Image (spheres, grey):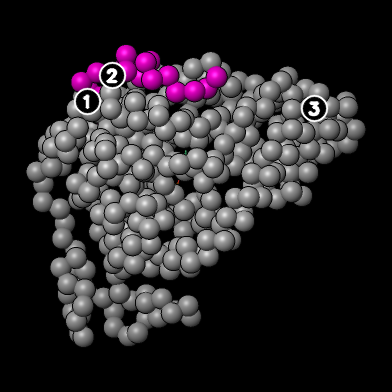
Amino acid sequence: MSVSDVLSLARPEIRAFRPYSSARMEADEASVMLNANEAWGNGSSDGGVLLNRYPEPQPGGLRARLAELYEVAGDNVLMTRGSDEGMDLLLRAFCRAGKDAILITPPTFGMYAISAGVQGAGVVEAPLDAGFGVDVDAILDAVSPAMKLVFLCSPNNPTGTLTPLAKIERLATALAGRALLVVDEAYIEFADAPSAAALLPRHANLVVLRTLSKAWALAAARVGVVLAHREVAALLERILAPYPLPAPSVELVLQALSRPEAMRERIGRVRGERERMAGLLGALTGVREVLPSAANFLAVRFDDAHAIQARLAAAGIVVRDLSGQPRLADALRITIARSEDNDAVLDALCESAYGGVAG
Ligand SMILES: *Cc1c(COP(=O)(O)O)cnc(C)c1O
């Protein structure tokens, strides 16, 4: 699929319009900067971050580090306010209100349908198969000319299921000329599996969403990344807010990226705790099934999920109720945390299994 085929799927008015040109885009280096109505002074905070000036719209240093991290070229990288903003940009650039649609594979992450709703785009569903795997044929059967984006989440939130790269490649190939395939890899670091970003050079219609919010423990910094063909990234940048990334966030992300060992260590601990919890939870009375997870959470089916949720709440533990998701009415999603917090979950559940000893 050539990139012009991909760009022809975008809203014509977005391709045609002239984006806002911020002062910082036009000039960002002179001894006296009088083009952006900023305050004078050195403006630096205790941490040394320059606060009186608008930040770089797409900070070059961070872009280079992220390109290295994700093993793509710098112009494949677009930094956004969380990957939630990446989803929103895709919807706004590719879907005309009242005309176009996206495809989702329920049970899956809720934000794709929310972004579609905000944009006035339709939502078509191709449910996951019996084992919560992606059903490629069901997706291809559901594709229509109105459908511009196919969202896959791998590992999937809330089931934890990983989609093999071969399946992603098969879909990207089959969708060429028809739709973009957006693979949300918010949890891929926990999976010990290759990123779909490796397929970008061969598939212009592929978009991969990454985030610093989960494995990098930077949810409050709000930095997400769209990895895409450079012309798709450039199209999305046209509709991105002028100065999306706060300088303190950029600084914090750079600091975290300079300590990859801390991240790897955390991933190792999460994986170890995930396997321990899956084994112990699976053996408890009242637990129907622990879904195999490649992420930092477990979806667990119970005989009485609501009673379990109440029991956990009484112990001061909140988990995610999945009863609104198709085929998960009896399930809760439990984040894998520090071992002492995981133990607290097990303790509360053991009490409930033996008839409710204490609250
Ligand atoms: C947590 C999560 C994200 C990350 O969102 P940010 O806006 O980057 O914090 C993206 N996709 C899924 C499926 C998630 O669960």
Q: Reply above or below: 146 against 317.
A: above
For disc 1, the marked residue is 178
In three-dimensional space, the C-alpha distance between marks 1 and 3, rounded to whole angstroms, equals 47 Å
Mark 2 burial class by Cα count in 10 Å: few <14, some 14-19, many 20+: many
Q: Disc 1 on helix, strand or loop?
A: loop
Q: Disc 3 on helix, strand or loop?
A: loop
Residue 279 belongs to the span the image colors magenta: no
Q: For the N terminus, give its image quadrant.
A: top left
Give the label on residue 143, or none: 2
For disc 3, the marked residue is 284
| Mark 2 and mark 3 residues within 8 Å of each other at the beta carbon | no
| Mark 2 and mark 1 residues within 8 Å of each other at the beta carbon | yes
Mark 1 burial class by Cα count in 10 Å: few <14, some 14-19, many 20+: many
Residue 243 visible: no
Residue type at mark 3 is Leu
In three-dimensional space, the C-alpha distance between marks 2 and 3, rounded to whole angstroms, equals 42 Å
Q: From the viewer's side, name the closer residue of 303 and 229.
A: 229
Q: Residue at x 29, y 57 (%)?
A: 74
Residue type at mark 1 is Arg
Mark 3 burial class by Cα count in 10 Å: few <14, some 14-19, many 20+: some
In three-dimensional space, the C-alpha distance between marks 2 and 1, rounded to whole angstroms, equals 8 Å
Q: What stretch is highlighted in magenta?
A: 131-148
